[in-house]
């Protein structure tokens, strides 16, 4: 960072391993609260939908079908993907507002007033809820809602 001492610049820029954690925590109105929850006994935090992103819940099978969709093979390349293994659900993050008009059968839109349980990205703890299948990177971790809708409809026969 120009004009800053190197020690200060190093403090201001998250390490690559922490980029996903900073992205996840930043969606909360009080990011330090997320960090405290991650350090607590359950090691998960509640992240609010409808603030920085909305989410679409779907079965793991549906998410795999979308990932393998030959008509849009790069759709999930940079997507942040959260999973709840006990419920066999994956959550894909989409732009704020997408949940309000979401209408794809077999999926559930999560917008304002919805919360997701999430472990701290980059930390390897055995848990079934809030596990990151794919963490956010420096690329935009949100999935284009129109492309996701189209891929889900194209692959609907794979995940009835």
Image (spheres, rainbow, N blue to C red):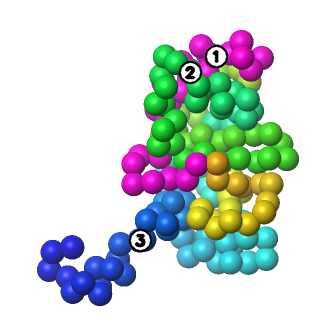
Coordinates of residue 110 in the picture (x, y in percent): 65, 40
Q: Mark 3 or mark 1, which has the lower sequence index?
A: 3
Q: Mark 1 or mark 2, which has the lower sequence index?
A: 2
Q: Name the residue under label 2.
A: 69
Toward which corner of the image does residue 152 lie, by quadrant?
top right
Report helix, strand or loop for mark 3: loop
Mark 3 and mark 2: span between their CA atoms? 33 Å
Coordinates of residue 129 in the picture (x, y in percent): 77, 54
Instruction: Tell me, yes or no, if residue 45 can be seen here.
Output: no
Q: Which mark is residue 139?
A: none
Q: In this view, does 125 lie to the left or right of 1?
A: right
Report helix, strand or loop for mark 2: loop
Q: Is residue 86 left or right of residue 13?
A: right
**At 58% across and 30% down in the image, what residue appears?**
67
In this rendering, which labeled residue sits more in front, label 1 or label 2? 2
Q: Does the magenta stretch include residue 111?
A: no
Q: Mark 3 or mark 2, which has the lower sequence index?
A: 3
Report the magenta residues as a range. Answer: 134-160
Instruction: Tell me, yes or no, if residue 64 can be seen here.
Output: yes
Q: In this view, does 104 lie above or below 67?
A: above
Q: Residue 14 carries which label?
A: 3
Nearer to the camera, 17 or 87: 17
Q: Are marks 1 and 2 in contact (CB under 8 Å)?
A: yes
């Amino acid at each position: 960072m120009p004009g800053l001492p190197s020690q200060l610049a190093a403090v201001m820029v998250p390490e690559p391993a922490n980029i996903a954690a900073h992205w996840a925590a930043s969606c909360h109105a009080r990011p330090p609260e997320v960090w405290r929850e991650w350090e607590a006994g359950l090691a998960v935090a509640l992240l609010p939908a409808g603030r920085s992103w909305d989410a679409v819940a779907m079965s793991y099978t549906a998410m795999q079908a979308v990932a393998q969709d030959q008509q849009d093979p790069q759709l999930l390349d940079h997507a942040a993907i959260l999973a709840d293994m006990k419920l066999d659900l994956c959550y894909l993050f989409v732009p704020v507002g997408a949940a309000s008009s979401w209408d794809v059968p077999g999926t559930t839109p999560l917008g304002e007033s919805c919360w997701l349980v999430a472990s701290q990205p980059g930390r390897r703890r055995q848990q079934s809820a809030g596990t990151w299948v794919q963490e956010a990177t420096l690329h935009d971790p949100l999935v284009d809602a129109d492309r996701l809708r189209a891929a889900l409809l194209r692959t609907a026969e794979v995940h009835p």
